[in-house]
Amino acid sequence: MSAPNCLRCLTRPSAVATAALRQPFTVPVSVSLTAAGRIAAFSTTPAQNANPTKAKGIGRAGPPVKRLANGHIRKGRMLTVAKKKPGNRPKAPLPGERKAYRKRILLSNSNALPVKGLVELDGERMLDKKNVAKVMSLPGPVIDQLRTVEAFKPTQNWGLFRDPSVLIRPETVDLMNQMQDSVDKKQTLKLVIDGDKLTGKSILLLQALTQAFLEEWIVVNIPDAQELTTACTEYGPIPGTEPTLYMQQVYALKLIQNIRKANEKVLSRLTTAFAHPELPQHIPVSSPILQLANAAKEPESAWTVFSALWKELTANIRGRPPILFALDGLHHIMKISQYRNAAFDLIHSHDLALIKLFTDYLSGQSSLPNGGAIIAATSRNNQPTSPSLELLIQQKIAQQKGETGPAKQPYFRGYDARVENALKNAQVVKLEGISKLEARSLMEYWAASGLLRTTVDEVAVSEKWMLGGNGVLGEMERASLLTMRL
């Protein structure tokens, strides 16, 4: 007998099951919505009462997590940087402290060996041609005077040696003889020292100052002419001058103090010859000139005191000593300065009273009645542009050699007639490299001081002489002393 349902029908849903599926699914009223939310197996809605996740810092990753073998989780360490405390800032330097450190000068090195047999300079040795190519030391009292007038430069290597010493060059002997002739003939020597970089222009000017101190001259030195023209010191118009001249009171006060301190021995022997009612302090006639110099105590009266002091020193009176007026950095006073007048126009450097005083003697418009010298040195390290000065120097050098100098460019408008007038009567000394004989003497001095650890022979001298640009002093120092490995 056949079955009521065949096997094929077993795979199909029955009529009873189909009817049950069609009935609606209802949730009991006693079940809450939260329970209904849990029943939904594929719902993407999160649970309402779940703890919200903590937001992490923007751009910061969480600490690394390390899982141990036993299933324990150890969190990594996080680097924490402590904030700087406001009290840890260094103390600011005092006003002028950086400049004093930058311009400090060391004149002795206790680690250097003392050179045996070193001869000390005096007034006669610098006049003798037999002392050319010899190194001589500066006397102790003169060193103090040179430091007072700021003759030493921070760029010079005085601090490498035991005592300050200089090399006597042929130009040194010629300059000292010219200074001596100017005193004998009661004339004024007008000289410009020129040369390439590091050829020893400032050293030659220092030797002239040394000779003047040894011979008890009155020495007035402007160590850096740049300070007079770059608008870094106070200035003001001098009443009653036409065209208007400008005084620099603070610089004049400093200059008077240097003159008084460096020439104190000579000034104490001289007496005043004129009455000066314009001074803030009454100075009777026949008072020591040192007392007149001591009257400058405030910048307001400094230029008045300087004018009275210069009038006394340049008086045509028997017994007055010669004067050496020196200036370093000639290019800076042969141009338009950075000062401005009441109309806000730039002031020419020759309208500054102190510079005009120097250029009047350099040009020959004024003269020293008791003899003396007006010496200026150029500076090639930070020189400003001065076409008239460069042209005149080349023309003067060519004339001294008996040659024809260069001519002016006809269509160039940068020439300055006031600069040409200031240098029309001046001589020019052109410094170049030293000879091999002078180089050998200098290297022997370096070796005796313990700074040059090599045998000083012809091969070593020729090598350093060539490396130094055929005897340029500064380049030889660089090649021999500043590049050595101790």
Image (cartoon, rainbow, N blue to C red):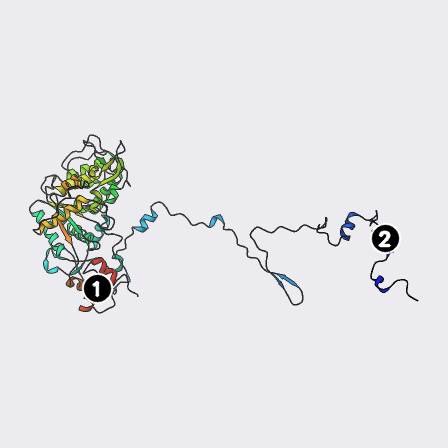
Q: Where residue 11 sits in the image (x, y, percent)?
A: 82, 62
Horizontal side of residue 107 vs 121, given as left or right: right
The numbered disc on residue 464 is 1
Amino acid carrying label 2: it is: Ala
Q: Where residue 323 sits in the image (x, y, percent)?
A: 14, 45
The numbered disc on residue 321 is none
Horizontal side of residue 408 vs 162, given as left or right: left
Front of the two marks 1 and 2? 2
In percent of the image, x 25 and y 44: which residue is there?
226
Q: Quadrant of the N terminus?
A: bottom right
Q: Quadrant of the C terminus?
A: bottom left
Q: How many marks?
A: 2
Amino acid carrying label 1: it is: Lys
Disc 1 element:
helix
Q: CA distance from mark 1 to mark 2?
A: 118 Å
In percent of the image, x 55 and y 55: which residue is there?
80
Q: Is residue 375 visible?
A: no
Q: Is residue 308 visible?
A: yes
| Location of residue 403 with respect to 303 vertically, above or below | below
Looking at the image, tell me whether mark 1 or mark 2 is earlier in sequence order: 2
The numbered disc on residue 19 is 2
Q: Nearer the viewer, residue 465 or 288?
A: 465
